[in-house]
Amino acid sequence: MASDKNPQPRTKTNPFYVTHDREKREMKELEKKKKTQKHRRRERENPPVKTRHFIYLFLFFSFLFPLVFPPLLD
């Protein structure tokens, strides 16, 4: 019964399957490259959220520290 459903088995000798697989593989590789390029571009334009939060916290505490602990800075 299986031979009726698929008369041409998936082998390396059958060129249709080989080209089809190659085309599929190439399309997937192109999509992957596009995704990684978009991802890299986004990171380059603005830093990740964690980095931004760290910068804000650092600035906040750097201004707050002299106000709260002035005797330590003498």
Image (cartoon, rainbow, N blue to C red):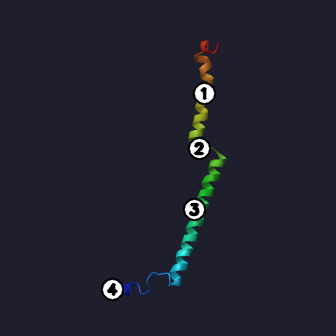
Nearer to me, 60 or 13 = 13
Cα separation, mark 2 vs mark 1, equals 19 Å
Question: Which residue, as the protein is rendered here, is positioned at the far front?
Answer: 12
Residue that carries the numbered disc 4 in the rendered image: 1
Label 4 secondary element: loop
> Amino acid type of disc 1?
Phe
Q: Are marks 3 and 4 in contact (CB under 8 Å)?
A: no
Q: Position of residue 25 (x, y in %)?
A: 55, 70
Q: Quadrant of residue 51?
A: top right
Q: Residue at x 63, y 57 (%)?
A: 37
Q: Quadrant of residue 27?
A: bottom right
Mark 2 or mark 4, which is nearer the start of the sequence? 4
Disc ID at residue 3:
none
Cα separation, mark 4 vs mark 2, equals 56 Å
Q: Residue at x 43, y 83 (%)?
A: 9
Mark 4 or mark 3, which is nearer the start of the sequence? 4
> Amino acid type of disc 3?
Lys
Mark 3 or mark 1, which is nearer the start of the sequence? 3
Cα separation, mark 3 vs mark 4, equals 39 Å
Residue that carries the numbered disc 1 in the rendered image: 60
Residue that carries the numbered disc 2 in the rendered image: 48
Mark 3 or mark 2, which is nearer the start of the sequence? 3
